[in-house]
Amino acid sequence: MAATSGSRRLESSPSLRRRACRPRPRFCTDVTCLPRLPLALLVAVGLAVAGCPAGDGAAPSSGGAGTVELPPPLSARPPPLPDAAAVDGATTSLSSETLPPHAPWLRLFYGQDLRGEIEACGCPGSPTGGFARRLPFVRDLREALPDGRLLEGPNALSRGLTGFEVIDDRDRARGRLILSLLAETGVEAFFPGQSDFRVLSPAELAVEAKGHGLTVVASNLAPDSMPAGWKRSLLWTVGEHRVAVLGLLGTPRREVDVARAPTIPPAEAVAALRAELAPDVVVAFTGARERERRGWPAELDVDVLLVPFEREEDVAEAWVGDRYELKADPLGRGVRRLDLVFTGTTAGVARADEMEIPVRGVVTQEGRWLLRHRELQELEARIAAGEDPRVSVRGYDGVTRVDPTTDPAMVRAGLASLVAERSRRLEHVRPRATPRHVAVGGVEVLAAELEEDPKVVARLDAFHSTWLDEIEARLTAARAEGVEDSRQYGGVDTCVGCHPTEYAQWGRTAHVQAYKTLRERAEQRNPDCLACHATGFGQAGGFADPASGQRLLNVQCEACHGPMAEHARQANTQGRALKPVPGLAVNEATCVRCHDSANSPRFDYEEYLPRGAHPARSHPGGHR
C-alpha cells in the first residue's frame, strides 16, 4: 500500500499540477496543427503555400527567441534583448513616491466564504484560487501597494453553512491548517462566523490563533464568552480619518450553538462601538445570510457591509439605502477588494458617480499592473535561466513582429504606461469633493496563470495524502472483515443487466466523465474532490483506491441511489417472486450534496433532473 500510495502522489506533484492547469505558448511546427485553424485561414494558407517558391524558409528559425510558425514560415528574428539595468525602474513601480496629490485612500483586500477550500477548485470553470496562489499574490501586493490591508472574513473553516453538517476530526484538522496558512499569508485579523465555531469552538480557536499570532475580531459575541486577547473591532487611521472594522456574528441556530457562541443584537453592538470609537466610516463583516439580515433593524449603523455569497444571479455590489453591500467571492477563488476614498465633507459613504469613475479607473490600472508585473517576473526568470522568452508571430498583414506579452522590454513599457495613467486619474480624486466618502468594490482573481508556491503545494499534498491514506486503510480493513450486503456497492456493471435503458441514459451524461476531469487536473489524490467525482468515496464498501479497483470510478448509479449490491443479489436469486429492496429516492437534497451554490451555481433541480433521472420509474418523494 505504501509503495502504491507513493506512486500516486507522484502523479499529483506540484510540477504536474502546474503543467496541467497552466497554459503555455504553443509552438506549431507541422501540419497536424492545421486542422485547428479557422477554415478561412486554411484557405488563405493553401493559396499562400501554392504561390511560394520551393525552399522558401521551410524550417523554423533556430537560436534566439522561440517562433510560432504560421504558414508561410517566419524568417525574422527579434533583435537582441536590451540590458535590463538600463530600464528606469521608478517609472514602472506602483509604490513610487512621486504620486500627485489626492484624497486619502484605504485599500482593503480580504477573503470571505472560503468554506474550507484550501486548493484551487475547478467546479465550475478553470481551477482558480487556492492558498498556493494566494501567497505569491500577497507577496506581489505587499511590494506594489505596501499600504494595503489584508483581512479574512467569516465562513473560512467550515465546508457547510447550514448548521447541521457532521463535523469530524478531518474538518478540525483542516480548520487548524487554514488558520496557519492565513497567518503565513500575512492576514492582519480573522473575523469568524457561527459556521467557523462549529469547527473550532471559541476557546479552541483562541488557542490556535494565539499560536500563530493571528488577531481575532468578534464584535457582538456575548462578553462572558469572549476569549482573552480577542478584539471587538479594528481601528485604522487614514490621513485624518478613522475607519472601524467590525465582525457581526449571525444568530445561533441550535441550542449547542447558543451555548458555544451566544451573541448580543448586532445593532446594539454597532451603536456601542460607534460611541466608543467615533469613526468616520464603519465596515462590518457578517456571516449572516440575507434571510436573517432582513430581520435586522433598519437603524443598523454600518456604512459598508461585507456579506456572504448565496446565489450566482445576485449582484456583487449594491446600495441598500445609504449602506454599501459587497457579496463575497466564494471558495477562495479570488481576493475581494474594497477601496475607501475620503473625498467627503461629512462622515459615511454615499453614491457619487462622478467620483467613482476615476476611482474605478485607478483600481483597474492597479489590477492590470499586478497581472503584467507577474508576467514580467516570469519572463525575467526565464532570461536568468539562459532562455530568450520572446516569440515572433506574423500578422495578417504579413509583417513579422514580437508578441508584446513575451518581450520583457515591452512589458516594462506597458507597466510604465499603467503607472502614468493611474497618476493622471489620481489627479481627479480630490479631498472634500463629494458630500460623503466613496466606496468601490472589486475582485482580484487568483487565476491559473499565477504560479503556485511550491512549499504551500507540498503542505497541501501532505494534508490530503495523510487523510486519503487513512480512509483507504479503514475501507481496506472493512472489506477484509466483510461488510454486510446492504452496505456494499456493486458498481455500474451490476446494474446494466436489469436496467439497460437507464444505463444508456447515464452514459450520455457528464457524470460518466467525472473522474477523468480529476486526472486531467492532477487532483485524483484530493479527498475533497473524490467525494463528488467517485461513487461511495469514504463509505464502507465504497470507492477507496483507483490502483486496486476501478469499478466505482465516476458518478455512477449508486452515487445517488445508495449501495445496491443487496438489491442486485435479491434480483438474481428471487426471480419474479419478490421485488428487490429499492434504492434511495433521489430528490433535490441528493443532488445539492455536490451541486451546491458555490460549486454548481447555475444548478436548477427542475432543469437538470430530466438529464439524469429516469421518469418512467418515478415515485412519490423523489425519483428511482
Image (cartoon, rainbow, N blue to C red):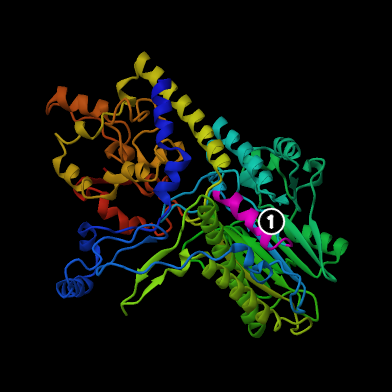
- Looking at the picture, tell me which residue is in the foreground, 200 or 63: 63
- Give the x, y percent position of residue 219: 76, 53
* Residue 541 percent location from the top left of the image: 35, 25
Horizontal side of residue 71 vs 14, given as left or right? left
Tell me the quarter of the picture where residue 283 sits: bottom right
* Position of 186 relative to 81 (above/below): above
Crowding at label 1, few (<14), some or many (≥20) Cα neighbours within 10 Å? many
Note whether 104 is above or below 622 in the view shown: below
User: Which span of residues is magenta-colored?
Assistant: 133-147
Q: Position of residue 289 (x, y in %)?
A: 58, 57
Main secondary-structure element of the magenta-colored stretch: helix
Q: Is residue 136 magenta?
A: yes
Q: Nearer the viewer, residue 352 or 408?
A: 408
Residue that lies at the very extreme toward the right in this rendered image: 276
Name the element at disc 1: strand
Image quadrant where residue 54 sits: bottom left
Left or right of 308 in this view: 602: left
The image quadrant of residue 472 is: top left
- Say above or below: 375 vs 6: below
Give me the residue at 36% from left, 62% from top: 67
Question: Which residue is drawn at the image coordinates 70% and 65% (left, top)?
Answer: 107
Residue at 32%, 68% in the rendered image: 75
User: Which quarter shows the N terminus?
Assistant: top left
The residue closer to the viewer here, 470 or 295, is: 470
Q: Quadrant of the C terminus?
A: top left
The picture places residue 383, in percent across and down from the top left corner, at 52, 55
Name the residue carrying label 1.
Answer: 150
